Image (cartoon, rainbow, N blue to C red):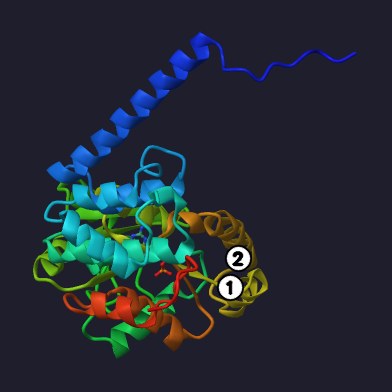
Amino acid sequence: MSEARTTTTPPEVDRVAASRAAVAARRARAAVKAGIAAGTRSPLDVLRAAYEDPEGVEGRLRVTEFLVSIPAIGQTKCTRIMDELQISPSKRLGGLGRLQRRRLRDFVADWVADHGGIGDRLVVLAGPTAVGKGTVAGYIRTHHPEVRLSVSATTRAPRPGEVEGESYFFVDDAQFDRMIAAGELLEWAVVHNAHRYGTPRRPVEEAIAAGDSVLLEIDIQGARSVRREMPDATLVFLLPPSWEELVRRLVGRGTETAAEQQRRLETAKVELAAVDEFDHQVVNVEVGEAAQKVVDLMRPRKGRRHAALRQDLPRTDGAPQS
Ligand code: 5GP
């Protein structure tokens, strides 16, 4: 015996609840737009929230609504941008494909940078232990002098060959405490349960103010802190080609004891799970190539973006190539 099912309109009480929820969602979206327009909410932060939760408030925003809420982008400019980015006007932020997401983010990062914000000027390179962050950063230091590398403060002792003020600022615990208390550090963390490492704030702020790009090579906790402090920063995650390769690199460099290696591998597993929190991923197969990819993300200002958009990005929406 089957129960009779009705497919008629939902009961009054459900309809009332649904329409209340719709009104609340509309209000929440309006608040996001108002925040962008007033400059209290970074458009990059809104994009990040939308990409993370496509069905959330930000994710349900139409791309067009999002764009016109950015100061100085009116309807005409919006239409042109949508055209250049090859996104159809009906799309919502959460409904964009991978390439469209990337194009929109790149565009917005450029816009933010061109309007006095951080945009892609502050790039954080993080990744699991032994993935080769230090090597990639070192390569960038040597081959890309136009990129400013932040020099961290640390409480660990210098290793042979390390130079004060170049490799690190080597400080003792009391000095590190003083730097924290004085607000001199943009972020800091205890790394590998051992020593404290932190990014001096002033050089980073000065470089950004001067229009330069700065690269921070720090651990994942530090990357998270930078995101909280400066939501516009670009976070890059360096990945190993495979787990086996990561193990090989960690064991192969022979700088840690067996117990320490084991501990770092456990940490690496947890760290790898953070990859989705980052804006970009770069696989470190070959150091020069990985370094180039990171440098390419630190795009030079002005002029480049639109030309690049027109040139080589394939359409993903099935529309004919123009
Ligand atoms: P090492 O002692 O091998 O030079 O560095 C150990 C770890 O500390 C690396 O993973 C490096 O990314 C991280 N690290 C270096 N400087 C900083 C910093 O300023 N802040 C944070 N959070 N981590 C850092």
For the residue pair 246 and 46, the one nearer the viewer reads as: 46
As helix, strand or loop, the secondary structure at mark 1 comes to helix
Q: Earlier in the sequence, mark 1 or mark 2?
A: 1
Q: Position of residue 296 (x, y in %)?
A: 33, 79
The tag on residue 261 is 2
Q: Position of residue 145 (x, y in %)?
A: 23, 86
The answer to whether residue 137 is left or right of residue 253 is left
Residue tagged 1: 250
Q: Nearer the viewer, mark 1 or mark 2?
A: 1
Residue drawn at x 34%, y 24% is 23
Crowding at mark 1 (Cα within 10 Å: few <14, some 14-19, many 20+): many
Query: Is 42 situated above or below 297?
Result: above
Return the residue found at the far right: 1
Q: Position of residue 226 (x, y in %)?
A: 30, 54
Identified by mark 1, the residue type is: Leu
Do the residues bearing badges 1 and 2 touch, measured as CB atoms within 8 Å?
yes
Return the residue found at the far front: 8
Query: Residue 24 lies in what quarter of the image?
Result: top left
Q: Is mark 2 within 8 Å of ligand 1?
A: no
The N terminus: image quadrant: top right
The tag on residue 182 is none
